[in-house]
Image (cartoon, helix red, strand yellow):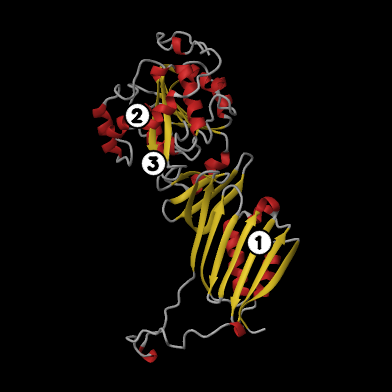
Amino acid sequence: MDVLGRNIVAELFGCPAELLNDVSLIETRMLEAAEAAHATVISSTFHHFSPFGVSGVVVIQESHLAIHTWPEYGYAALDIFTCGREVDPWVCYQHLLTALNAERGSAIEQGRGLRSQLATQLTPGALDDAEAPPQHLRPPPTPREPMRNVWFTERDPEIALSLRHSGDVLHRARSQHQKIEVYETYAYGRMLTLDGRVMTTEGDEYVFNEMMAHVPLLSHPDARHALVIGGGDGGVARELLRHEQLDRVELVEIDAQVIDTSRRYLGKLSSALDHPKLDLRVGDGVAYVRACAPATFDVVCIDVMDPLGPSHGPFDADFYRDVARILRPGGVLVTQSASPRFDIGVFQQIHACLRGLFGPDRTFPYLIATPTYPSGTWSLTYCALGPRDPRRDFDRARARRFTEAHDLQYYSDEVHTAAFALPGYVKRLLAGARRPSAPRSDMASSLDREPGSERKA
């Protein structure tokens, strides 16, 4: 049959899930399949979808190879199209059947563009540029590497974030707690992901870390002892340790491999992990807080993936009550508190929980602009054991000097106060936040006790 092209539509069954969820490996296998058939690769574009799935296409001079994977089913769908007689699509199919470790495959071939049904529309040279120089005067084409277009995608039911990266995973490991990966992205430098979710990137990490550390430290008149729960990448600790008045910073991270990965691949973030004032511990932050003596810390920063509030997981009302217990009089808690645009329920729950523990006049949400977090708008919440308002009760001149001395990228005295200016939709969400069903603890009523007085959990 005389046709313009050959099209194989194929299915692969019983492939390993880990392999089908590895966007870089899928791209490599597809490129190898094209090369095995002696196709000329022009470009490749591949996307990973969180939590599962890869889609991609290799554009070849002779047409294309396309794939979509369902790792949860061990299944991949293929579309292989070639034009001319030089490239055999069955070579590509057989290569992928083996390279993707399929237990079995199914494929059919269809001819495309039956010549007997086609009429010539153009003659050779009809579209040539009349002004183009003769062929013998044109410079030879410059060989170039095929363009790679590989994307990491964090996808949730209603929103997705895609970042183009080099195509090579710098690091992949599975710890006792989670899958840890590091990518080299084009827009934001190196990126750390945990279980397929963006945790931090070199390009915008300073936003979160500066605002979690400097807002409480520059609102507290004389903080000496700080605690970070989570934050194993080292970014919050790095920012805290810029404050020379601190005598000690303790960091408790549950996953040692996060710390090791940051040391190896994220040197700027992890630069303070060996600081002499830092006490770095690997362990369960919830248990650590529960075991701490009362009135131990001036500042506590909660930098965990999912501080889900009063009815979810370990970071519940009891945990935050324990945090309040270990704060010294006048102490400050700052916790990340989700996105008011992306995760409204969690945002409201955390606010209701903290407001119930510390009191509405001592609970202050504030917003930061983080491009690589869902929706780009994220919230932190400041809570005080005492009548200290972070919008007013901070030394603006001191904050300005500190910002200039350390050449900060996001925090400034103006940003400090502006972050607490909440848009109307956020105020309405906070007003509608469900109050805890249980009676409020006596924590808020005991916040003004004199230093040294006992505080109940």
Q: Are marks 3 and 1 in contact (CB under 8 Å)?
A: no
* Percent of width and height locating residue 45: 52, 62
| 388 sits to left or right of 148 | left
Which residue in the structure is indicated by mark 2?
A: 420
Q: Secondary structure at mark 1?
A: strand
Q: Secondary structure at mark 2?
A: loop
Q: Is residue 74 above or below residue 122?
A: above
Q: Are marks 1 and 2 in contact (CB under 8 Å)?
A: no
Q: Are marks 2 and 3 in contact (CB under 8 Å)?
A: no
Cα distance in 3D space between marks 2 and 3:
18 Å
Residue type at mark 3 is: Tyr
Residue type at mark 2 is: Phe
Q: Residue at x 53, y 27 (%)?
A: 309
Q: Is residue 432 above or below residue 136?
A: above
Which residue in the structure is indicated by mark 1?
A: 77
Specify whether residue 251 is in view. Answer: no
Residue type at mark 1 is: Ala
Q: Secondary structure at mark 3?
A: helix
Tell me which label, 1 or 2, sits earlier in the chain.
1
Q: Dot 3, crowdedness within 10 Å: few (<14), some or many (≥20)? A: many
Tell me which label, 2 or 3, sits earlier in the chain.
3
* Percent of width and height locating residue 375: 44, 42
* Percent of width and height locating residue 401: 25, 33
Which residue in the structure is indicated by mark 3?
A: 206
Q: Nearer the viewer, mark 2 or mark 3?
A: 2
Circle number at residue 291: none
Q: Quadrant of residue 219?
A: top left
Specify whether residue 369 is in view. Answer: yes
Tell me which label, 3 or 1, sits earlier in the chain.
1
Q: Nearer the viewer, mark 3 or mark 1?
A: 1
